[in-house]
Amino acid sequence: MSKVLIFGHQNPDTDAITSAISFSYLQNELGHNTEAVAFGKPTEETQYALDYFETKAPRTVTSVSSETDQVMLVDHNEAQQSAPDIDKVKVLAVVDHHRIANFATADPLYYRAEPVGCTQTIIWKMFKENDIDVPKNIAGLMLSAIISDTLLLQSPTSTTEDEKAAHALADIAEVDLNSYGKDLLKAGTNTKNKTASQILNDDAKNFPMGESTVRIGQVNVVDVDEVLARKMELLREMQDQSQASNYDLFMLVITNVLENDSVALVYGDKTELVKQAFNKDIVEDTVLLEGVVSRKKQVVPPLTKQFEQE
Amino acid sequence: MSKVLIFGHQNPDTDAITSAISFSYLQNELGHNTEAVAFGKPTEETQYALDYFETKAPRTVTSVSSETDQVMLVDHNEAQQSAPDIDKVKVLAVVDHHRIANFATADPLYYRAEPVGCTQTIIWKMFKENDIDVPKNIAGLMLSAIISDTLLLQSPTSTTEDEKAAHALADIAEVDLNSYGKDLLKAGTNTKNKTASQILNDDAKNFPMGESTVRIGQVNVVDVDEVLARKMELLREMQDQSQASNYDLFMLVITNVLENDSVALVYGDKTELVKQAFNKDIVEDTVLLEGVVSRKKQVVPPLTKQFEQE
């Protein structure tokens, strides 16, 4: 039987990359033959964590069905965020913390989703349920994903379960949660060396909403103006990509990870729906989203509602 | 906040009814305010278990959105098997052991599916994970569902996890697994007092396959000929219901629970696909399915494959 490949979503963030690593370790300990792979290279933030905990990045792939017929998904379930050939393989398991959409199987499977801040919090529970020890380096990577997804436990997506997992994993990894956390978040906020396309797409996902396709990117910064200074360049790139891929709306959420606020840059025929969803005026292509840091919890649900009412 | 309603699929079987009861008990112990309800009356088998363990059947409902805006689903996820107004309420949690299809949410949720024989086996694990004791009567109902879904651990859907749960629950319920199990299964095999419509629909589900809608009923018997003696009556009823509801195929799987074989009675425009799916001839509207006892594992997957190739 071919090796089972385990992977997170395209444009992998720290949770997508490291959950593949930790879940593959867990599955192999349970007697399965799996390998973590990734649909993209690590971001600077993820690379910081991999370097700190001396772990190799998963092998990068662009498809899976040529080398296996069985896969496990972490940190995503929606087909358009997954392997381009996901319909040609059998999904044995999913561990995720997102809404369920555009996902269907012919057979029963293992599916574990919980409304927590990070996939690694669920995987941490599975380690405990199966009575398997987490190695120090993997604990550090799991912790890094929780810090990344919950902005050091400050995001509204963060739950008491994420807190419990983060503290336990910090102990195993032998790091100070707060000082390591701030260093990790800062490592992911460097936009100066990034192209406009990288800023837009490094952490972007497509969401079918009503009859429309909405692309939402998010970038973490310590200074929002550093990104907004490149607004015209970003809007031109958003226009090109929207035309090429038929997006009805392209939204870039620029999040200040120290102040926990965001500004969204918006492009497309449907920007009026952003105005309605957040009850905010669009001023020079931007919308101020006070207190908004979570795409999943604070951006996607109100936008989806607005598109479905349209 | 309104009470959270917990329910299994329409045409509830023993797992659907009793999983609502046990999961509601667990959720209430965890501090939530829930009530088990059901989309139909208990079958004779389920009533036998409820009587034996002196537990009231859940309240029967025909819709949910008039009394709550939040629900939890057990033993199903597909919209067409659920509350008719499922799109008007928020699904907080799902515990299930079937394929995932026709299911989507706007928000993250708790979803727990495992490829085991019975939903109660998963709920049993959740009791243990949360360190909550199962009361004797609820243990008896959980055991009854496992016996029912796995035909006393003989079905190919039965796993070592179902076995472990069944033995542990039999201890708590203070019954002998085998003798109670046979009595329970026999209680569900009385077809003499049933109308043709009851035989067809008491445990029937609709499955969208490719572009078609397939309805598959299953009835457990100790004598297949008792049901086949009423073939003309059953075929007339299948014809009426197929015309009324636009089924492309109606299949009744008649399963001998003592011998673990089935005979399927088939009606509709697409019976040719049954022949191809199982590589068996259709003789006088029936197909002999040797060793087949599981609709989910042995009937739906090959049929789905055939309809999708069409």
Image (cartoon, coloured by chain):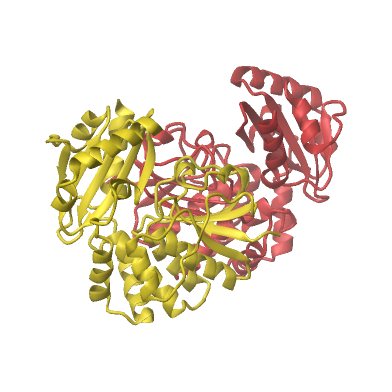
Chain colours: A red, B yellow
Answer whether residue A134 is visible to the viewer in this image. no
Residue A128 on image: x %, y %: 49, 68
Q: Is residue B179 left or right of residue B243?
A: left
Q: Is residue B218 left or right of residue B138?
A: left
Q: Quadrant of the N terminus of chain B?
A: bottom right
Residue A87 vertical placement versus B46 (above, below) = above
The foreground one among B158 and A32 is B158
The foreground one among A44 and B307 is B307
The foreground one among A15 and A141 is A15
The foreground one among B35 and A52 is B35
Residue A44 on image: x %, y %: 65, 43
Residue B150 on image: x %, y %: 29, 61
Residue at 34%, 60% in the rendered image: A31
Q: Is residue A195 left or right of residue A32?
A: right
Residue at 26%, 36% in the rendered image: B236
Residue B169 vertical placement versus A54 (above, below) = below
Residue A200's quadrant in the figure? top right
